[in-house]
Image (cartoon, coloured by chain):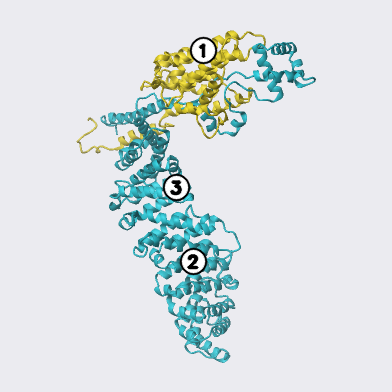
Chain colours: A cyan, B yellow
């Protein structure tokens, strides 16, 4: 199909516009480049030989010395004699001679040539300096050639950055209303409202714009009508005044800053109430940053921690404008007050706890901040002032630190490992903020029990992720069951007992993998959750350990080899369920743990004989459960072998 | 529009040609290595110059030439030629590069080549003015180039003077060069206007310090016929005109103890140190 005539001018003007735009910017930027600082040497000053004439004479006159030999080789004896005569007469020797002798003297004696004028950079200083430092000494700056300074610089910085990063799409970037809003916001908040007359302003503007462009490119189509960058840029601009360019530069140059900008761009896309609070949020952010800077030296120096705090502030505020962003503790914004409380407690506890002081930064601090905010949000009447917040944080951190101190005792876990554990534990706890707010000690006890289990199980048992998965499951079970919460310490103690028992060598072998061990723990939680009152009763009578031991030690000796892996997990679960279901018989001592142990052993031996007749892997667990259930319903002295046999035979006949 | 028709037997107008056109446009643009080519090329010239400058620095601090280093800035000069052939010789950028090229020849003792640049550099002076009315580095360098060249060249002759060679006439020539630079910077001492010299520009103070160093050569070569106090004082005073009040205060302190190349990164330190030295020695 031939090209329509009218389309050609359209195409040409599109080409010209695109090229003109680039050419114009190129002209402006290249003119600016001509006035960049470039280094120039000053002329070399004259050698300062005069103070050394006598030294030179001594050197060259020394009999059989290097100087004498040099004069001979270079045929300078006569000239030297003349030099000496003139000097001794108090006159000035001829210029060429004195300089030549001085140069020769320095070369031969290894001395540095001295020159007239101030100290020149020595070879040693230059060798130890990096190129930037060297150039900085020699650069000669230039005034601009163009007329307007600040406006031009803002436009140049913006255009330059857009072209550099957005490239061919620079024009498209600012023609789209959403992204144009970003550039307008940046220039307005960061460059126009403040002085823009130095290199640092330009660097910061370019970095912020660069981050915004990258964030936009990573989130195509997800921008809000009015992206929420305004409060962030504005807050950074505010704190530049109080905290300096370097503080802001550290934050925005950190590798995580782009990710933070992405979150700001997209997080509040659909929340109109947050967008209307832009000015408010900006104030809170500024105060948050100022609070950080004044509080805790480690945090202030750690851009990752600062970014983490900003991210937490954003997500918490966006999720709950009225409950978090707009709320105050006393005369302080809640976000700021909580930050201060957390910082104070971390610093305070860090004095007496090396673990906390050594990991009071990086990802831990934002994790604590986040967990506390979530707890406050979920329990607004429970934690409703700074004092209660500090108490809460103190207990949380002390509990966690105590727990972690017991993790792998005798080893020296790295700070990184412990911080990882603490942060992930906090994140898990924070997933149940309502629970955490009301049952902090209970939650800490669960953590302690699980970690202790991990210790007992040893290095080839639970990994960190396994431990964390177990914690999560234990807490999840507790949040759904008030009965477990009422067990209080006993629940944690139960977990520990089961965990230790499951970690025994012979049981672990049967469970086959750490995954199996984990599944067994999950099964235990379900078991206990099914009947917390009975388990509480058993614990009170110190029957839990003996029962667990009775059951697991018998299963560990299974001669059939049918109980392993998932089947064993199922067996553990079903057996303990049925035991608890008829738990009163155990509590009242109608049935004793030793009986259960003997019964199960006999049942397993009988099952071994029935393989190929009536027992296989499919009905094995059912068989064991029925044996137990029937026995507990009508217990008899377990040493009556005949009765045991009869019981087993009856069940095999009826059900297998 | 003869390519449109209402004849329903023909196919309706297609958007295909538009896609072809815009594909061509973006192919054209995406084929370019950079979106701001002239700026990038000029930046590259400067970067190459800085790298070659660093190589020049090392031998000069230990007092003798390192024969393994080519101190004639070959890379930079090649890039300058390439830039001018691509973007023309009559642009501001080309004129800036003329000044840079001329200064390269001075610093690398290629005085013959520098002489060949005299006219071009002189012509460039008028075009390198700032629209604000203040002087710029390149403008001042261009205006002073003739004196810079004569001073550097004569100093080189003096440094290589043979024993018993009469060098006193060189002192007069170097003094003339210093005075020439002074005349460019301060044409009329009674009408000196510091506002013409921007705080952002170090061209004047660089030239003033150059002239001051020329003066030290004058005294060193011919102390018999030159007074130390007035010779050094002339240099010190000239530098002092372009120092701020606070810099003059700093100069009173023992600046020789400050590490000239260090993390402080004050590019005006060398001028302040020269001022300190000359003022003290002139007493």
Tag of residue A256: 3
Give the Cα distance between marks 2 and 3: 30 Å
Disc 2 is attached to a residue of which chain?
A
Tag of residue B177: 1
Using the rendered image, report if marks 1 and 2 lie on a common chain.
no
Q: Which callout, 1 or 2, points to the residue nearer the camera?
A: 1
Question: Closer to the camera, A435 or B76?
Answer: A435
Determine whether label 3 and label 1 are within 8 Å by CB: no
Q: Which residue is mark 2?
A: A447
Q: Which quarter of the figure is the N terminus of chain A placed in?
A: top left
Residue A540's spot in the image, x, y percent? 49, 80
Question: Closer to the camera, B111 or A216?
Answer: B111
The outermost residue toward the left is B6
Q: Which callout, 2 or 3, points to the residue nearer the camera?
A: 2
Establish if A136 lies above or below B96.
below
Residue A310's spot in the image, x, y percent? 40, 50
Quarter-wise, where is residue B109 in the image? top right
Residue B268's spot in the image, x, y percent? 49, 27
């Amino acid at each position: 199909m031939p090209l329509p005539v009218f389309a050609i001018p359209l195409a040409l003007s599109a080409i010209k516009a695109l090229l003109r735009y680039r050419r114009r910017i190129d002209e402006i930027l290249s003119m600016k480049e001509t006035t960049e600082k470039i280094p120039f040497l000053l002329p070399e000053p004259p050698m300062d030989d005069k103070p050394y004439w006598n030294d030179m004479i001594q050197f060259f006159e020394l009999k059989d010395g290097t100087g004498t030999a040099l004069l001979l080789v270079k045929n300078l004896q006569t000239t030297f004699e003349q030099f000496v005569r003139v000097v001794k007469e108090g006159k000035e020797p001829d210029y060429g001679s004195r300089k030549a002798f001085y140069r020769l003297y320095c070369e031969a004696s290894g001395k540095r040539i001295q020159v007239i004028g101030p100290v020149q950079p020595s070879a040693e200083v230059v060798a130890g300096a990096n190129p930037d430092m060297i150039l900085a000494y020699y650069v000669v700056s230039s005034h601009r050639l163009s007329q307007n300074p600040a406006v031009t610089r803002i436009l140049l910085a913006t255009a330059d950055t857009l072209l550099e990063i957005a490239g061919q799409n620079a024009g498209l970037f600012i023609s789209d209303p959403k992204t144009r809003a970003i550039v307008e916001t940046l220039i307005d908040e960061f460059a126009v409202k403040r002085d823009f007359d130095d290199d640092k302003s330009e660097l910061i503007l370019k970095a912020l714009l660069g981050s915004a462009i990258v964030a936009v490119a990573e989130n195509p189509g997800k921008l809000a009508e009015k992206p929420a960058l305004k409060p962030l840029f504005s807050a950074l601009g505010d704190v530049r005044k109080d905290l300096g360019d370097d503080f802001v530069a550290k934050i925005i140059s950190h590798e995580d800053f782009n990710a933070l900008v992405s979150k700001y761009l997209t997080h509040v896309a659909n929340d109109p109430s947050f967008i209307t609070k832009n000015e408010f949020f900006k104030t809170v952010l500024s105060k948050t940053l100022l609070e950080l800077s004044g509080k805790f030296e480690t945090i202030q120096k750690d851009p990752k921690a600062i970014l983490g705090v900003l991210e937490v502030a954003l997500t918490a505020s966006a999720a709950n404008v009225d409950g978090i962003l707009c709320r105050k503790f006393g005369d302080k914004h809640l976000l700021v007050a909580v930050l201060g409380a957390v910082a104070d407690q971390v610093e305070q506890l860090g004095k007496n706890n090396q673990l906390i002081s050594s990991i009071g930064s990086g990802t831990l601090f934002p994790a604590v901040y986040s967990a506390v905010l979530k707890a406050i949000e979920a329990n607004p009447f429970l934690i409703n002032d700074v004092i209660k917040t500090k108490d809460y944080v103190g207990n949380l951190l002390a509990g966690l630190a105590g727990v972690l101190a017991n993790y792998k005792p005798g080893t020296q876990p790295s700070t990184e490992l412990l911080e990882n554990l603490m942060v992930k534990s906090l994140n898990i706890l924070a997933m149940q903020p309502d629970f955490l707010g009301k049952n902090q000690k209970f939650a800490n006890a669960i953590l302690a029990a699980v970690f202790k289990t991990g210790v007992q199980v040893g290095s080839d048992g639970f990994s960190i992720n396994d431990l964390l998965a177990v914690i999560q499951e234990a807490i999840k079970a507790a949040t759904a069951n008030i009965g477990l919460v009422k067990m209080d310490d006993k629940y944690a103690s139960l977990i520990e007992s089961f965990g230790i028992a499951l970690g025994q060598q012979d049981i672990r072998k049967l469970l086959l993998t750490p995954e199996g061990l984990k599944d067994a723990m999950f099964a235990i939680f379900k078991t206990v959750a099914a009947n917390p009152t009975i388990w509480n009763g058993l614990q009170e009578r110190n029957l839990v350990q003996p029962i667990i031991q009775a059951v697991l030690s018998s299963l560990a000796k299974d001669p059939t080899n049918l109980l392993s892996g998932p089947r064993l997990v199922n067996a553990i679960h079903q057996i303990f369920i049925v035991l608890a279901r008829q738990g009163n018989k155990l509590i009242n001592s109608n049935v004793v743990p030793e009986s259960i142990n003997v019964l199960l052993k006999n049942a397993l031996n009988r099952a071994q004989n029935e393989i190929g007749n009536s027992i296989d892997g499919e009905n094995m667990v059912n068989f064991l459960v029925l044996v137990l259930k029937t026995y507990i319903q009508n217990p008899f002295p377990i040493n009556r072998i005949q009765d045991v046999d009869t019981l087993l035979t009856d069940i095999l006949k009826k059900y297998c | 529009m003869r390519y449109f028709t209402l004849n329903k037997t023909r196919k309706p107008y297609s958007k295909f040609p538009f896609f072809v056109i815009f594909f061509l446009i973006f192919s054209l643009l995406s084929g370019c290595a950079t979106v701001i080519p002239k700026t990038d090329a000029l930046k590259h010239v400067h970067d190459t110059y800085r790298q070659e400058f660093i190589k020049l620095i090392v031998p000069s601090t230990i007092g003798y030439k390192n024969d393994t280093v080519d101190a004639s800035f070959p890379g930079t000069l090649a890039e300058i030629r390439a830039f001018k052939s691509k973007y023309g010789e009559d642009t501001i950028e080309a004129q800036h590069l003329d000044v840079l090229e001329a200064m390269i020849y001075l610093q690398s003792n290629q005085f013959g080549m520098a002489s060949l640049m005299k006219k071009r550099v002189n012509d460039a002076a008028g075009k390198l003015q700032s629209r604000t009315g203040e002087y710029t580095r390149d403008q001042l360098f261009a205006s002073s180039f003739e004196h810079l060249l004569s001073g550097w060249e004569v100093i080189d002759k003096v440094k290589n003077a043979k024993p018993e060679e009469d060098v006193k006439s060189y002192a007069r020539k170097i003094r003339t060069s210093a005075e020439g630079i002074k005349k460019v910077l301060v044409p009329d001492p009674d009408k000196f206007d510091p506002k013409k010299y921007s705080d952002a520009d170090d061209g004047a103070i660089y030239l003033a310090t150059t002239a001051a160093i020329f003066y030290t050569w004058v005294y060193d070569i011919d102390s018999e016929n030159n007074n130390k106090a007035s010779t050094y004082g002339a240099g010190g005073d000239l530098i002092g005109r372009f120092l701020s009040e606070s810099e003059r205060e700093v100069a009173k302190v023992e600046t020789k103890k400050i590490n000239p190349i260090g993390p402080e990164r004050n590019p005006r330190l060398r001028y302040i140190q020269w001022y300190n030295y000359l003022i003290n020695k002139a007493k």
